């Protein structure tokens, strides 16, 4: 018996991986590595709730919310950059990429100010278990953000030069930036809000 | 004038920001007259809301909703794995405390 297969619809044909597939492998691996660390943090936190709460009280939730909204806005901006580049609106795409980088730098400045405040108050990497996790997670995330700033710089360079424009590279770089964003979303919930 | 796709991105950003602001309510409801107290519901709520935001970022900003079904399912599976890993370790920690 023979079976007939329906031809793919236009929508199905149009479906494609945003950016390079290799970047998605990196996204999934990074997510698992961070999730493993989040699991370790939550395991110890659940065992020493009182000690964690006492140290966590020194964090400013409002500052964490501002950090999060700054990064979410940067993600929105880089998503617009991808759409503008796809539509051939390159000046707008370059502007969006520059806004993304500026918001990334603002996030970093806020983080450095927050670290300085904690260190001045005597809360350091070795002052308690909560702050060990806090500094480890926020510094590792900041390193990812610095790499993200280089990646956004590549986007600006590509889009500004008509000979270098490559939509797949723009999408790949944006995918990395969004990963930095969603990792922060998780870090914020675990460090600033979890009880 | 915003295009339909730009409107969708804006809507996603509004929802993500609103969920972020909702953390203030979780924080306030978990306090005992201004003193932070341990709360399983606040912790689970914070993790679940964060994972909802991760999924929205993946679907809308990372354009997974236009990606092949394999990537859609894989990213959804990853969100479930992250939830299982974090909540599993949290409750394991509580069980042995």
Image (cartoon, coloured by chain):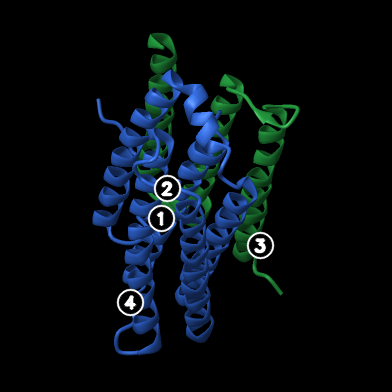
Q: How many numbered badges does the structure rendering display?
A: 4
Please indicate, yes or no, whether residue A60 appears anywhere in the rendered image: yes
Contact between labelled residues 2 and 4, with CB atoms less than 8 Å apart:
no
Q: Secondary structure at mark 3?
A: helix
Q: Secondary structure at mark 2?
A: helix
Residue at the spot x=26%, y=48% of the render? A25
Q: CA distance from mark 4 to mark 2?
A: 22 Å
Residue designated by label 4: A154
Q: Secondary structure at mark 1?
A: helix
Q: CA distance from mark 1 to mark 3?
A: 23 Å
Residue designated by label 3: B7
Above or below residue B14? Residue A103 is: below
Depth-wise, is mark 4 or mark 2 nearer the camera? 2
**In the rendered structure, the residue with mark 1 lies on which chain?**
A
Contact between labelled residues 2 and 1, with CB atoms less than 8 Å apart:
yes
Residue designated by label 2: A183
Contact between labelled residues 4 and 3, with CB atoms less than 8 Å apart:
no
Crowd around label 3: few <14 · some 14–19 · many ≥20 (10 Å):
few
* Quarter of the C terminus of chain B within the rendering: top left
Above or below residue B23? Residue A11 is: below
Evaluate whether label 1 is on the same chain as label 2.
yes
**Sequence order check: which comes first, mark 4 or mark 1?**
4
* Quarter of the N terminus of chain B within the rendering: bottom right
Horizontal and vertical percent position of residue B5: 60, 63
Evaluate whether label 1 is on the same chain as label 3.
no
Depth-wise, is mark 1 or mark 3 nearer the camera? 1
* Image hue for chain B: green
């Amino acid at each position: 018996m023979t079976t007939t297969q329906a031809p793919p619809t236009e929508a199905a044909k149009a479906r494609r991986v945003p950016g390079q597939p290799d970047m998605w492998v990196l996204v999934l691996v990074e997510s698992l590595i961070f999730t493993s660390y989040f699991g370790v943090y939550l395991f110890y936190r659940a065992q020493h709730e009182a000690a964690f709460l006492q140290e966590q009280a020194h964090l400013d939730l409002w500052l964490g919310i501002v950090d999060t909204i700054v990064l979410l806005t940067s993600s929105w901006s880089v998503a617009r950059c991808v759409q503008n580049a796809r539509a051939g609106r390159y000046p707008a795409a370059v502007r969006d990429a520059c806004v993304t980088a500026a918001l990334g730098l603002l996030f970093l400045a806020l983080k450095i100010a927050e670290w300085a405040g904690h260190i001045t108050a005597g809360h350091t990497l070795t002052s308690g278990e909560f702050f060990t996790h806090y500094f480890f997670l926020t510094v590792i995330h900041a390193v990812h953000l610095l790499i993200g700033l280089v990646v956004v710089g590549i986007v600006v360079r590509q889009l500004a030069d008509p000979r270098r424009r490559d939509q797949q590279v723009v999408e790949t770089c944006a995918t990395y930036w969004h990963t930095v964003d969603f990792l922060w979303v998780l870090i914020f919930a675990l460090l600033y809000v979890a009880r | 004038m915003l295009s339909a796709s730009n409107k969708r991105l804006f809507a996603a950003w509004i929802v993500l920001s609103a969920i972020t602001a909702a953390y203030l309510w979780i924080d306030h409801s978990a306090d005992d007259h201004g003193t932070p107290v341990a709360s399983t519901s606040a912790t689970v709520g914070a993790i679940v809301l964060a994972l909802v935001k991760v999924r929205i970022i993946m679907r809308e900003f990372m354009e997974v909703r236009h990606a092949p079904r394999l990537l859609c399912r894989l990213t959804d599976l990853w969100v479930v794995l992250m939830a299982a890993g974090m909540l599993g370790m949290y409750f394991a920690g509580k069980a042995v405390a």
